[in-house]
Amino acid sequence: MNRVLSIPLVFLVVCSIGTALPGRASANNIPQLNGNILGWDAVNLTWSPVKGAIAYRVYRSTSMDNLTESLLITVNWSNYSKFNPGEAYLTGEIVEYNGSLWRAKHVTSSPPGDGDWERLGPIIPATNFVDDSLRGNTTYYYFIRPVFKGGKLGRPSNVLIVKTPPQPYRIVVYYISWGIYARAFSPYSIPFENVTHVLYAFLKPLPNGTVTWADPYADPMNFEALQRLKKKYPAVKILVSVGGWTLSKYFSDIAADPIKRENFAGSVVEILKKYGFDGVDIDWEYPGGGGMEGNHVRPDDGENFVLLLKTLRKALDNASTWKHYLLTVAAPADTTIASRVNWGEVSKIVDFIDVMTYDYAGPWLNVTYFNAPLYRDPSGPGLGSVNETISWYLKRVPSEKLVLGVPFYGRSFANVPPTNHGLYQPFNGTPSGTWGPAVETHGVMDYWDIAGRIASGKCTRYWSSASKVPWAYCRGVFITYDDPESIAIKVEYALNRTLGGVMVWEITADRKPKTESHPLLAAILRTLGEKPPAWIPDEHVLGVSRRVHVEVQRPTTASPPETSSGICGPGAVLLLALAVLPLTTRRR
């Protein structure tokens, strides 16, 4: 039986480097380093400013022994954006321009320096840094040093010791770029507090390998929103997904050409760094064919797919000295298609693999069937199942690298006879879907739409005890879908097979427009019995501040010592602070 173990607190130990002095040093020349836990893999470092500093060096290590040599990053930017020519700025907005900070006196798009702007002074480097590439269940040591003109280093701060909790179970959701239109589902509607990863679908690969907008109107708007949400929920990883069913035409050409592979990788890195996102998801449907008509296909697509991922992984690793950029892939449910790729090799390159365990049924069949049956029904037509797909991958990929896909949508079939309540019966065409006529939607329906039809009495729900999924029959229309009961069973299946998480296609289909209800996501959370890492409740609920405030005595040395005894060396002053972290971990 599964139990849920609460982790009520995280320790942040703060100590000085070197010998302690009686009394307290002035904050204007020695920085005071504090920490604020943001999630299982993220901490916000803040420090007091040092007069005259033009930058701050941040050091991080998992050991005190090499801390002084473990430079993580140099913070030499301000907390304000650089002036962007052509952009309109509102009254009071502050920008960087030519080494100074400027504040707009009124709405303007002119460059700073004329009467529209007030110069505030030279650029002051930021005094905080969010480190969001930590590992779970690991101890980290931090300290900082100010940098002055000429590269001279100032005296070091205290040491901050951060112990991270175990990594929570992955809850990965795709967000579709076109959600802003008829669905009225903007990125702000994504329940960030209840997920671990958001994958933005989709960006478009061009013939030369570069990656660009798929929707020049929606994508920039959505990216701006996601940038803001990333600042609000730094523990949630935001990835851009490239390709998908309709945008995989040129993957074969790109993967086959070393120059185009480099173009692709460089373009992805540029996007991630520009917008501050956490990684990339490759959704090539599919190497070797089986995707949309007109896709370019080669016999060696499987091998070239691995080469593309290797090139991309190398570029991501070279893009930052401190941040680990995530690389994920979407994998097919059809094992015949999947067999063209060496998934064992892929698993060594990527962070995890999202298995698209759905679309087992559709208008391409000649009988009605389940969209995502967990198990094969012995009395059924002998088609595939989630269990068969996952069992195939488990022979090739470590279980923790596999993420189980669950659909938040259903498929419908028209002109179905009432025999067996429409299950395993012939059909003729598809009805209109939730968001358009059959010719456009092929009968695809959002979960909330299906649930509403059942609740109104238009359709009747039935349950397959063999396949562990529901279906609905509605006077000649057969609908296959997942509901809270089947989703919960699939989450338990993922846990029992020690899979690395669950993935949702896609999050907009769970919420009826103009409501805030997410019943299928709620079923996932109930089954896991835990909250993902972004969830940080109000301080008054916890009864303790999330921010760790400490005071320490200061070192006499201008540089950290090469050796130390004890946890922080002789004469160090230790203080212990607690921060409640509302995470749980599942014990098996």
Image (spheres, helix red, strand yellow):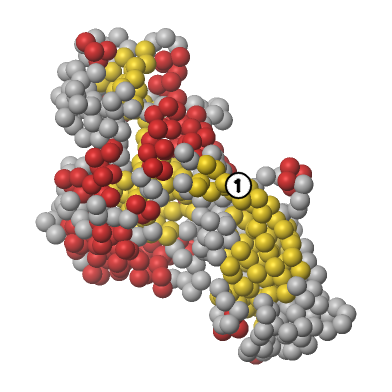
Q: Residue at x 41, y 38 (%)?
A: 491
Residue at x 31% of width, y 14% of height: 473
Looking at the picture, how far across and down is residue 569, in whole percent?
69, 83
- Confirm whether residue 223 shows in the render: no
Residue 27, quarter of picture: bottom right
Write down the residue under mark 1. Answer: 6
Percent from the top left, x then y, of residue 246?
Answer: 28, 43
Q: Residues within 10 Å of mark 1 (few under 14, many from 20)?
A: some
Q: Residue at x 85, y 78 (%)?
A: 24
Q: Is residue 306 above or below residue 382?
A: below
Res 424 → quadrant: top left
Residue 355's place in the image compared with 547, above or below, is above
Q: Nearer the viewer, residue 55 or 170?
A: 170
Return the x and y of residue 293 as percentages of the image width and height.
17, 42
**Residue 372 % position (x, y):** 30, 32
Q: How many tags in the picture?
A: 1
In the picture, measured across the screen, residue 73 lies left or right of residue 501, that is: right
Q: Is residue 521 left or right of residue 11?
A: left
Question: Secondary structure beneath disc 1?
Answer: strand
Could you tell me which residue is drawn at 47 percent across and 71 percent down? 320
Is residue 311 visible in the rendered image? The answer is: yes
Closest to the observer, 233 or 38:
38
